[in-house]
Image (cartoon, helix red, strand yellow):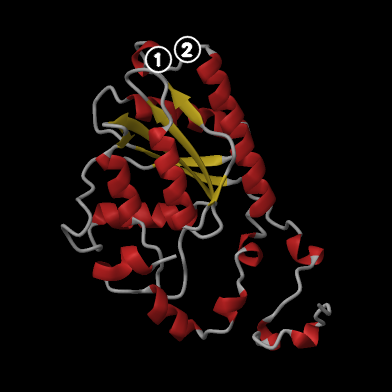
Amino acid sequence: MTKNSAGDLHNVVHDHLHIPTADKLAATASHKPRILLLYGSLRARSYSRFLAMEAALLLEHFGAETKIFDPHGLPLPDDTPDTHPKVQELRTLVAWSEGQVWCSPERHGAMSGVMKSQIDWIPLSTGAIRPTQGKTLAVMQVSGGSQSFNAVNQMRVLGRWMRMITIPNQSSVAKAFNEFDEDGRMKRSPYYDRVVDVMEELVKFTLLTRDRSTYLVDRYSERKESAQELSLRVNLPSAVEDDSAT
């Protein structure tokens, strides 16, 4: 078979076929990395909240700016218009963030409903813009029993679905009731060391990608479409969105 030349790519629109170049990957931002943390429990003594707070302290030590969303009062998805103040608060924080931490308890072998509701309120698209696309993500979970990875695995799937850059490392804290003191601070342990690792890695990946995320997720197929066409395609009716979004 004869090797094809660029001119043999007869199925592509060459005006929209860009060659990746290193000069488009330069870093320019000087502000602190902006990290949003979400946790998945409404309990007064919530171990996922404690873990998120511990993560925020580490992120700030590593030079990041953090904000933690309080899910109290957030309605169920589709139970109220998205103009609800808590929904708008969440979406504003998502837009502000350059990276995120999702921390859920594991319930019945899955992430909690509180965690999933927060993610479900984050739109896949706003007009032709995808609010989470290109942002970094770290996933963590707490368990009441032995160590498990069901919740973090689910959140990884959701992170991919939301077009986020999910970092390789993750944290799963087993028997979480043994890992925090009366003040909600995490005790010294291998679990704590892993949380340090994950937050350090998240800051590194955020610094590496935040100025480049627009370029990294710039796609040939979407360049072919106008902003209006893209908006019509990605803003599908809610009844079919789950089956059609990619």
Position of residue 237 in the picture relative to residue 153 (left or right): left
Residue 211, above or below 202? below
Q: Position of residue 37 (x, y in %)?
A: 44, 40
Residue 168: image quadrant is top right
Q: Which residue is drawn at 43% across and 54% down?
A: 94
Q: Residue at x 69, y 88 (%)?
A: 10
The secondary structure type at the circle numbered 2 is loop
Q: Which residue is drawn at 68% across and 55% down?
A: 29
Residue 63, above or below 80? above
* Residue nearest the observer in this picture, 63 or 237: 237
* Residue nearest the observer in this picture, 113 or 2: 2
Query: Of the residues under marks 1 and 2, which one precedes in the sequence?
Result: 1
Q: What residue type is labelled 1?
A: Phe
Give the tally of numbered discs: 2
Give the labeled residue for mark 2: 187
Q: What residue type is labelled 2?
A: Lys
| Residue 63 showing in the rendered view | no
The secondary structure type at the circle numbered 1 is loop
Q: Position of residue 104 (x, y in %)?
A: 36, 34
Residue 87: image quadrant is bottom left
Contact check, label 1 and label 2, Cβ < 8 Å = yes
Give the labeled residue for mark 1: 180
